[in-house]
């Protein structure tokens, strides 16, 4: 694992939820902050954020069912939000701030819509909540365009996590995400929400983020220049600063947008 992660000692836990087992790690003290990864991913995608965030929060890094150390189980996209709530119940987490990246953002948004009492503040990072308007071939081309710009250290993590999740599973779930339309849920999300997007994202293009910000009643869209689909890894210092400013701000319901270098 990377040096960024090795500096933080985490508690490693495996919990049984009905017929499934969910792996997660915990570190830091303070208010609970739950990090939810995306497709073909795992808790490892937050490696460059953990050292900073654990100075301010009790951070929970979850491996969704079917991914990371929760692998070899079938992932069901429409059940993922409910599973996270069951996990929170098991841990006695009445409420938490939640950050979701990509598919994890879609899941976090659904959790905030269906279980509003469980979310304090919400951060959505390149989250595919609205329909793409195209199918798998064009989506695959967007992924291919993104790969050449990703850092080498991240590509190693991506390949490992994809193999653990299974390529066929990733394709199956990816197709579901491309057909995602949760616009009917947006009006139910009433918590302060920060939307973070990489300006050069070709996997979940920026127009989807702009439309998402327009549809969320208490949202603030923040663009990060010079990065693609994984801003928390590509520009961790900027990402961490945005997260801390939002979560510590007493008035986080702004609707303006901005850009960060």
Image: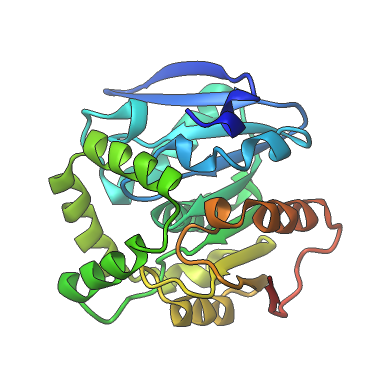
**Coordinates of residue 217 in the picture (x, y in percent):** 63, 75
Whether residue 253 is visible:
yes
**Coordinates of residue 128 in the picture (x, y in percent):** 40, 66
Q: Residue at x 38, y 73 (%)?
A: 202
Query: Residue 208 vs residue 164: left or right?
Result: right
Quadrant into which the C terminus falls: bottom right
Out of 75 and 69, give the one closest to the viewer.
69
Out of 234 and 183, give the one closest to the viewer.
234
Q: Residue at x 86, y 57 (%)?
A: 250
**Coordinates of residue 237 in the picture (x, y in percent):** 69, 52
Whether residue 41 is visible:
no
Q: Is residue 226 above or below residue 40?
A: below
Looking at the rendered structure, the number of numbered marks drawn on it comes to: 0
Query: Residue 46 vs residue 23: left or right?
Result: right
**Coordinates of residue 85 in the picture (x, y in percent):** 48, 38
Q: Is residue 16 above or below residue 235?
A: above
């Amino acid at each position: 694992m990377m040096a960024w992660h090795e500096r933080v000692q985490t508690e490693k836990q495996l919990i049984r939820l009905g017929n499934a087992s969910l792996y997660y790690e915990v570190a830091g003290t303070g208010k609970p902050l739950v990090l939810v990864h995306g497709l073909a991913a795992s808790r490892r995608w937050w490696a460059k954020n953990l050292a900073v965030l654990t100075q301010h929060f009790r951070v929970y890094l979850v491996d969704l069912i079917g991914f990371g150390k929760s692998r070899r189980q079938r992932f069901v996209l429409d059940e993922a939000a409910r599973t996270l709530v069951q996990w929170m119940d098991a841990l006695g987490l009445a409420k938490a701030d939640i950050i979701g990246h990509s598919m994890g953002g879609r899941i976090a948004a659904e959790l905030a819509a269906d279980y509003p009492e469980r979310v304090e503040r919400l951060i959505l990072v390149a989250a595919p909540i609205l329909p793409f308007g195209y199918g798998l071939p064009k989506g695959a081309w967007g992924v291919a365009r993104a790969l050449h710009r990703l850092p080498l250290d991240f590509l190693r993590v991506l390949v490992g996590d994809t193999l653990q999740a299974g390529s066929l599973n990733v394709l199956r779930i990816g197709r579901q995400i491309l057909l995602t339309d949760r616009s009917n849920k947006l009006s139910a999300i009433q918590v302060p929400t920060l939307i973070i997007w990489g300006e050069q994202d070709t996997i979940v293009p920026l127009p989807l983020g702009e439309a998402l910000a327009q549809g969320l009643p208490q949202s603030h869209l923040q663009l990060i220049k010079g990065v693609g689909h994984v801003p928390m890894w590509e520009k961790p210092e900027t990402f961490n600063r945005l997260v801390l400013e939002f979560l510590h701000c007493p008035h986080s319901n702004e609707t303006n947008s901005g850009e960060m270098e």
